[in-house]
Image: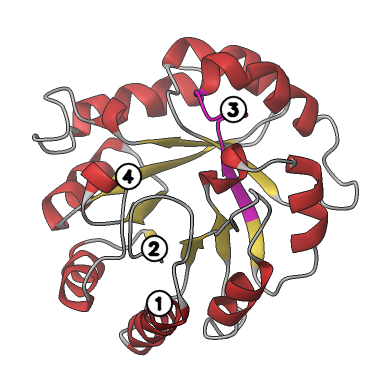
Amino acid sequence: MSKRAVLEVIALDARDAVAAQAGGADRLEVVTDIAADGLTPSVPAFAAIRAAVDLDLRVMLRLSDGFAAGDAEDTARLVRAAGELRAAGADQFVLGFLDAEGGVDLATVERVVAKLDGRPWTFHRAIDHTADRDALRKQCEGLPGLDTYLTAGSAAGVDDGLAVLIAEAGRHGEQGYEQQLLVGGGLRLDHVPALRAAGIDAFHIGGAARPGGWTGPVSAGAVGEWRRVLDGR
C-alpha cells in the first residue's frame, strides 16, 4: 500500500489554520496577500497561526509579485525577514527566485537560505516559469534544507503539466530529483488518481480549500474531502 499522502493547505490566518487542521491537513503554507500569489507574512501573523495549531508550517519568503528578488535593497529586506521569522520560531520555509533570463537566481537563493540554519524548505512554482526545469534542479542541488519542489508541471497549471509531473516523478532519486514533488497550481480532485499512480505523494491546495473563493475562509469540509480522496476512502 502506498504511504499516506501529504496534504498542504494555504493559510492566511489562524482561522484558516484551525479549519485546515480540522479537515486533515498535514502542513500549512503560511502567506499573506494572495492577490500577489502569496507573500511573506508578518511575524505577528505567523505567531498567531503557530499558536493556533500544531501542524508543520512552511512560511513564504517573497516580498513582491512575480519571481524576481528585486535589487540589492530588496534582497537585504528579504534576508532580514527570514532572520526575523527564524527568531520567532519559523522552522520551515518556501522560496525561489529567477533572474531576468528565466534561470534560477542562485546568488539570491543562497543568501536567503544561509539565514535558515539548514531548516527544510520548498522551492516554489518559480520552477514552472523557468527557461529550463532540469537545469534549475541541477543548479539547486546541494542547497542546505531543500527537500521539496512545489510545481504544477507548467506555468498554466496541472492540466497542462500532468505529463511533466509524471515524467519527473519517474526520475525520483536521480541527481536533481531527490526532492519530494509537491503538486499544486490548478490541482483538482480528478487529477489525483493519475498522480498517485505515478508515485506522487504530496499535494498542495489553496482555492480548492475555499468553496467561497479567496475572500472566504478555508473550509474544514473541503479539506476533509481532499483528505478522504488522498487516503482512498
Q: CA distance from mark 4 to mark 2?
A: 10 Å
Q: Are marks 3 and 1 in contact (CB under 8 Å)?
A: no
* Badge 1 amino acid: Leu
Residue nearest the viewer, comparing 78 with 211: 78
Residue at image coords 58%, 39%? 129
> How crowded is the residue under tag 1: few (<14 C-alpha within 10 Å), some, or many (20+)?
many
Q: CA distance from mark 3 to mark 1?
A: 26 Å
**65 vs 8: above or below:** below
* Residue 34 position within the rendered picture, expressed as x and y whole percent measured from the top left: 24, 45
Residue nearest the viewer, comparing 175 with 3: 175
Q: Assess whether residue 156 is covered by the magenta stretch.
A: yes
Identify residue for label 1.
78
Q: Which residues are magenta?
A: 148-157
Q: Is residue 32 left or right of residue 162?
A: left
Q: Are marks 2 and 1 in contact (CB under 8 Å)?
A: yes
> How crowded is the residue under tag 3: few (<14 C-alpha within 10 Å), some, or many (20+)?
many
Name the disc covering residue 154, or none.
3
Name the disc covering residue 37, or none.
4
Residue at image coords 80%, 43%? 134
SS at circle 4: loop
**105 vs 37: above or below:** below
* Residue 172 position within the rendered picture, expressed as x and y whole percent measured from the top left: 82, 40
* Residue 232 position within the rendered picture, expressed as x and y whole percent measured from the top left: 51, 18
- Which quarter shows the C terminus? top left
Residue nearest the viewer, comparing 233 with 60: 60
Name the disc covering residue 23, or none.
none
Identify residue for label 2.
62
> How crowded is the residue under tag 2: few (<14 C-alpha within 10 Å), some, or many (20+)?
many
Q: Assess whether residue 117 is covered by the magenta stretch.
A: no
Q: CA distance from mark 2 to mark 3?
A: 20 Å
* Badge 2 amino acid: Arg
